[in-house]
Image: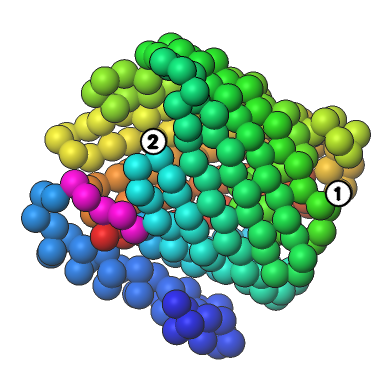
Amino acid sequence: MRSVWLVARVPDGLRLVGIWTMAALLMGAACAADDGASARDFKLTFGDYLYHDAHGQDVNLRWQHGDTHAWLGEYSDASFGRQWRTGIDGAFELAPALQLMPSVQVASGGFVGGSVNVQWGHPWYVLAGWGRTNLRPYFNLNFDPNDAVTFGAGHQADDGSQIALTLIADDRLHTGQRDWHLQGRWPVWGDQRLTLDLLRKTGLGDGGPVRAWGWTAGWDWPAWFLRIARDPKQNFSTQDATRLSAGVRF
């Protein structure tokens, strides 16, 4: 992963070429080696964040075993700087159709955060959760308030399709920040999958009141995936962001 950050010291055009060339090579290798096997424990994601006059980059390696996930990543841009992060989450069956889903993560600069969600029901379900951090500097790649409560409801079908409505609302810093997500996922054309997320955000941001719409669209193949997102007032800042991501599972 070090080679990705070497291109951050050269002009923007060359940096982007380096990042996306590396992503394309990895995805091409994955496709060439794709033998239809479903066991892929690792996911490597390259992300580029396009702002009005700047770029940010993120590299993230995620591991999965059953319902347990662990990740290690790094984000960097000229304004925020560089931050490493790692974390783990899981799901535990408390009773039929009742799950407890805790998570914890830490980051360079002394950041520590965690959350716990409870989900009940299948195929229709409801969700409630609560998150807290130590309020140390942190570039939030979840793009929702971290010190917040979560409520949601949705449907998960046996064919892998899913639709959900989720609210994440600040309950600590008195900003009134609320993110509503209407998310859908559908299998298409065999092993491929389409994911859409419509975002509505309101609340007090760095530049005053925020009322904005955003969206994310993604396409998954068995071994690799692409994402594009438009997020006005990212993290309730004054910056509008377009995010491009590509990754490989192996």
Contact flag, marks 1 and 2 (Cβ < 8 Å):
no
Q: Which residue is mark 2?
A: 195
Q: Tag 2 or tag 1, which sits nearer the N-term?
A: 2
Residue 82 visible somewhere in the drawing: yes
What secondary structure is found at the residue carrying circle 1?
A: loop
Tally of numbered discs: 2
Q: Position of residue 12 (x, y in %)?
A: 55, 78
Q: Position of residue 143 (x, y in %)?
A: 65, 45
Q: Toward which corner of the image does residue 29 lie, by quadrant?
A: bottom left
Q: Residue at x 37, y 20 (%)?
A: 156
**Residue 139 marker:** none
Q: Residue at x 57, y 55 (%)?
A: 87
Q: Position of residue 207 (x, y in %)?
A: 87, 47
**35 within the magenta span:** no
What secondary structure is found at the residue carrying circle 2?
A: strand
Q: Residue at x 24, y 23 (%)?
A: 159
Q: Toward which corner of the image does residue 146 lie, by quadrant?
A: top right
Identify residue type, mark 2: Thr
Quadrant of the frame with the C terminus: bottom left
Q: Position of residue 178 (x, y in %)?
A: 74, 30
Q: Toward which corner of the image does residue 26 lie, by quadrant?
A: bottom left
Side (left or right) of 25 relative to 155: left
Q: Residue at x 49, y 58 (%)?
A: 71
Q: Residues within 10 Å of mark 1 (few under 14, many from 20)?
A: few
Compute the Cα span from label 1 to label 2: 30 Å
The magenta-colored residue range is: 38-42
Side (left or right) of 221 relative to 70: left
- Return the residue nearer the eye: 37 or 198: 37
Quadrant of the frame with the N terminus: bottom left
Residue 77 visible somewhere in the drawing: no
Q: Which residue is mark 1?
A: 206
